[in-house]
Image (tube, helix red, strand yellow):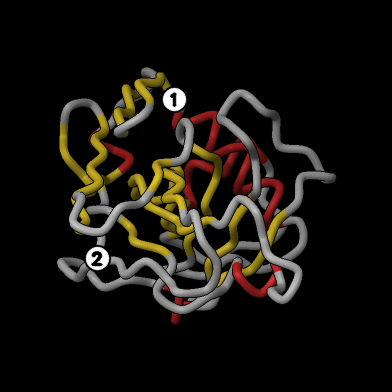
Amino acid sequence: MKIIALLRQSVSQPVTPSIPACIVPDSALVLPGRPVFIPDLGEGWQGQPVIALRVGRLGRDIAPAFASRYVDAVTVALRLHLPQVPADLSGGLLCGMDASLAPGAWIPVADLGDEPVHVTTPVADIEVDINSEIKSAVASVSRYMTLKMGDMILAAQAGDPVKLVAGQRVTASIDSREVLSVKIL
């Protein structure tokens, strides 16, 4: 299983071959029900809500017209982010830091229909065309690597980052269904 993070600033930014991306190891995942700990590497950690897609089928070099066949579920995940990386740390390595990605509960794509969905995070209230996200993200990523069942694509940021404070709970919902609720310690 692999996690591919497309580092798009928002869902309105188009997916192009020049979009930066990073491969996140599965050790970055925070298990469901577990808290997220603010790392002691640097100051000012933020939680970036992101639209996450789960791959449900094997495929490579997938055309946008067929991309929807390859994603079986969607959620909002919280990805830890350090806006100002100190000189003694590697920003590239922080992308794959252990316990830095908390995915929410998965909603089957079939349950969402063809209309844009309403995504609510602590700092944003946005409309997301999930079908468009699937087409562009899957086609772009599968051009370079084989997608396998269980892979996750972090397609785009869902609004502004949340300043993380010990003791808070970060939540997110898709069409009024809470998918993410994680305690910050």
| Relative horizontal placement of residue 86, taking residue 43 as reference (left or right) | right
Question: Residue 22 placed where, x, y %?
Answer: 67, 63
User: Which amino acid, mark 2?
Assistant: Leu
SS at mark 2 in the image: loop
| Relative horizontal placement of residue 166, taking residue 12 as reference (left or right) | left
Quadrant where the C terminus is found in the figure? bottom left
The Cα–Cα distance between marks 2 and 1, rounded to whole angstroms, is: 30 Å
Is residue 84 positioned above or below 39 on the image?
above
Residue neighbourhood size for the residue with mark 2, other residues' Cα within 10 Å, grouped as few (<14), some (14–19), many (≥20): some
Circle 1 is placed at which residue position?
Answer: 128
Callout count: 2
User: Foreground residue, 115 or 163?
Assistant: 163
> Residue lying furthest right in this view?
18
Q: Quadrant of residue 82?
A: bottom right
Question: Residue 33 placed where, x, y %?
Answer: 15, 66
In percent of the image, x 54 and y 35: which residue is there? Answer: 133
Q: Nearer the viewer, mark 2 or mark 1?
A: 2
User: Which amino acid, mark 1?
Assistant: Val
In percent of the image, x 78 and y 38: which residue is there? Answer: 16
In percent of the image, x 41 and y 60: which residue is there? Answer: 56
Q: Quadrant of residue 149?
A: bottom left
Question: Residue 46 placed where, x, y %?
Answer: 45, 50
Going from N to C along the chain, the mark reached first, 2 or 1, is 1
Residue neighbourhood size for the residue with mark 1, other residues' Cα within 10 Å, grouped as few (<14), some (14–19), many (≥20): some
User: Foreground residue, 41 or 183?
Assistant: 41
| Relative horizontal placement of residue 32, taking residue 84 as reference (left or right) | left
Circle 2 is placed at which residue position?
Answer: 185
